[in-house]
Image (cartoon, rainbow, N blue to C red):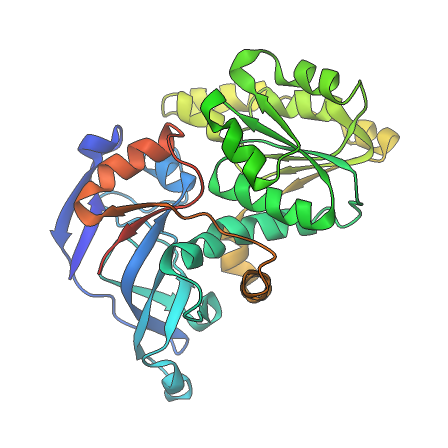
Amino acid sequence: MKAIQLIKYGSADKAFRSAEVSKPKLQSEDDVLVKVHAFGLNFADVMARKGLYRAAPPIPAVLGYEVVGEVVEVKSKNHQSLIGKRVVALTRFGGYAEYACTKISGLVEIPNQINDGEALALATQYCTAFLAVKKCQELKEKDAVLIHSATGGVGTAITQLLKHKGCKVIGLTRSNEKVDYLIKNGVDIPIVTTKGDYSKQIQEAIKNKKVAASFNSVGGKTIKKDLSLLATSGQLVFFGISDRTNQKRGILFTLFQLLKIGKTHPAKLLLNSQAIHGLNLLALADNKSEQIKEALQELISLRLESKIFPKADFSFDWENIAEAHDGLEKAKFTGKVFIKVV
């Protein structure tokens, strides 16, 4: 079968090649083979391409966390009814290909009302957003919340889910040109981080009040800033370290990143009744897959009820993988970015 392999760490234009590889073989009773119609790109893929994601397989590797397509083979006769079904599936890598293997616990049937791009957005971005928001169950109507990278796939999803709760959303972007997108998606207070310290801009915008929650995918010095903005009982959900992509590979640069994030003593969280939550979708897929499946099923219902609106306007053909990867890394796009296979 045809697959896109990561063959070299670094810039997108030199990192990939299209190659013929063996079709995945089903090993366990829960394995399912999907003929891929489209696969999604995620920021973790960018980290893997740059050699900064330890969980990624060694090169040459086939990346990819989620696919949408048709079930063509199952290992167990108990799952025979899935043959021919259109599904969205999470893959532990291997998604950049014509066929991908997944687990029965990692797929959900997708109705025809949801197109390929929307389905892929629900799989990773919206699942991440759903589980992040779930960690902050005490959020109430009119609570101020902060979202980093609010024009990205996860940021878009968190905004919609929080607006569904009636929260007041503060959305960060690096580009003034994306402010209109933020506003149309429901952001109440758009902040352009290149115009100055975002924490000062937020304090001016909300008149020195505090935020009830922060959803942070950046890391670095932003963690300290966000903690300084949190109200009593405030919560910080930390689900990515995009700041790490600006540094080279190696243990010294990883340690430098940890130093930038800094230390937070539990006693300080105790005094302010605050919490920091970590969220790693890959770890949940490996160890708590039922949480992902439940989240996906709930998200599909929300989409069919027109309560969320996945954005998936940036699709690319197979041969344009480098352009798609580069644009994702440089935040050129809004919403979900995906590759069409058939």
At which x and y percent is residue 127? 54, 54
Please provide percent x and percent y for residue 15. Answer: 21, 35
Quadrant in which residue 294 is drawn: bottom right
Q: Quadrant of the C terminus?
A: bottom left
Q: Nearer the viewer, residue 276 or 208?
A: 208
Percent from the top left, x then y, of residue 150?
55, 34
The quarter of the image holding the N terminus is: bottom left
Outermost residue, right side: 271
Q: Residue furthest left?
A: 20
Q: Which residue is situated farthest in the top direction here? A: 196
Picture layout, residue 123 above or below residue 132: below
- The foreground one among 149 and 78 is 149
**Where residue 146 sits in the image (x, y, percent)?**
66, 32
Position of 51 with respect to 134 (left or right) is: left
Q: Is residue 17 left or right of residue 276?
A: left
Figure disc tally: 0
> What residue is shown at x 26% (from left), y 32% (from top)?
9
Q: What residue lies at 79% left-to-right and 26% top-to-bottom?
A: 210
What residue is shown at x 28% (from left), y 44% (from top)?
58
Q: Is residue 175 visible?
A: no
